[in-house]
Image (cartoon, rainbow, N blue to C red):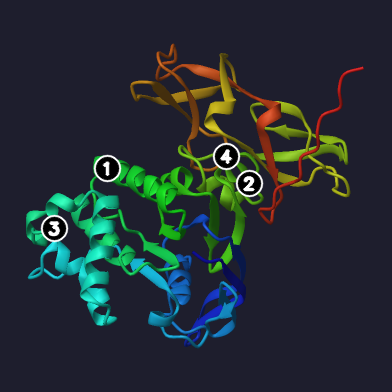
Amino acid sequence: MASVTLNRINKVFGRDHIIKDVDLAIGDGEFVVFVGPSGCGKSTLLRLIAGLESISDGELAIGDTVVNDLPPRERGVGMVFQSYALYPHMTVYENMAFGLKLAKESQETIEERVMATARILQLEELLHRKPKALSGGQRQRVAMGRAMAREPRILLFDEPLSNLDASLRVQMRNEIARLHNRLGSTMIYVTHDQVEAMTLADKIVVLNGGRVEQVGSPHELYQRPLTRFVAGFIGSPTMNFLPATLVTGDADGCRVRTAGIGELALPQDASGRRADEALTLGVRPEHLRLAEASGDNAFEIVNVEYLGNEVYVYLEPRDGDTLLIHRSEAPSRWQEGQRVALVPDPEHLHLFDTAGHALPARPRRAAA
């Protein structure tokens, strides 16, 4: 096990600046997930840690050792890719032992490590099989086992579940989480799926355009996003966004006006901001209540999705083309075509300025 420290890491491909001044500290034994949309640089950042790409600028340390110039085999990392990359002519045992043979380990050491890894991953009954006789989940476990058998200080995962079907992804997520709990290894995991990030990570690193948008626990990112990008990316269904205008504000709170809802008193710090400043109001689907209404201020329900234990109600927006979403437990009394008023929970609202930065929230004063 080892810590990983990135100090102002940059990566440039020709004229393209892919990774931009990334500072990050990953503690010994942490499970960290890099998440973000396609092209944000998350896989490139993982490859820089692995040594599969060279660093253009900055310093990368694993433990107490700066590894910028070390080849992958000397960094003490094991990597599991999206593609299983198993040798089809080799058995499960031979695939898991291959890296150890290249490292010229003794036969006794190879036997001990492969069997120990097979027990952890529940592959003991499959060691004689070849990859074509395995399911997708079994193949992914073999790929993990091949990396683990080398006893790396850090395990790196590059979208390892993206080729699996939905039910198998859930199963493998649980197996990876249990594996981390058993081994206590430092793990860095790349995914575009924010559900994987939320369910697996001790700490999530949200990347956007090669930069780190926010680092924190799943709870912190969901409850206190620092930017509109993070607020919209983390959470499913996504956060609702409505145009708003600042009415009054200071360090103790503010009042904003939103079309169709009216004025709201919020605990965000709006000191130094001018009246009539354009803002964006953010509210999670579960923090948006509905009430029967009519007239010009009402919103129309355009679709109701029943998902068994919960219901998503989609509403026609006043501005823009993105539908608003209300989430509640099933059953629901709302139907398509009804007109309703939106009643957001003021304790769970977010405000963002035109640059996409969140206004910091201030605790509400207790009633006298």
* Mark 3 / mark 1, whichever is N-terminal: 3
Q: Is residue 30 above or below residue 275?
A: below
Residue position marked by numbered label 4 in the rendering = 319
Q: Report the mark closest to the observer, 1 or 4.
A: 1
Do callouts 2 and 4 mark residues in contact (Cβ within 8 Å)? no
* Mark 2 / mark 3, whichever is N-terminal: 3
**Whole-percent x and y of residue 135?**
14, 51
Amino acid type assigned to the residue bearing label 4 in the image: Asp
Q: Alpha-carbon neighbours of circle 1 within 10 Å: few (<14), some, or many (≥20)?
A: few
Q: Alpha-carbon neighbours of circle 2 within 10 Å: few (<14), some, or many (≥20)?
A: many
Name the mark on residue 225. 2
Say whether residue 265 is left or right of residue 349. Answer: right
Do callouts 2 and 3 mark residues in contact (Cβ within 8 Å)? no
Amino acid type assigned to the residue bearing label 1 in the image: Ala
Q: As rendered, which of 104 and 90 lies closer to the eye?
A: 104
Quadrant where the C terminus lies?
Answer: top right
Going 64% across and 27% down the picture, which residue do you hit? 260
Residue position marked by numbered label 3 in the rendering = 127
* Mark 2 / mark 4, whichever is N-terminal: 2
Residue position marked by numbered label 1 in the rendering = 166
* Mark 1 / mark 4, whichever is N-terminal: 1
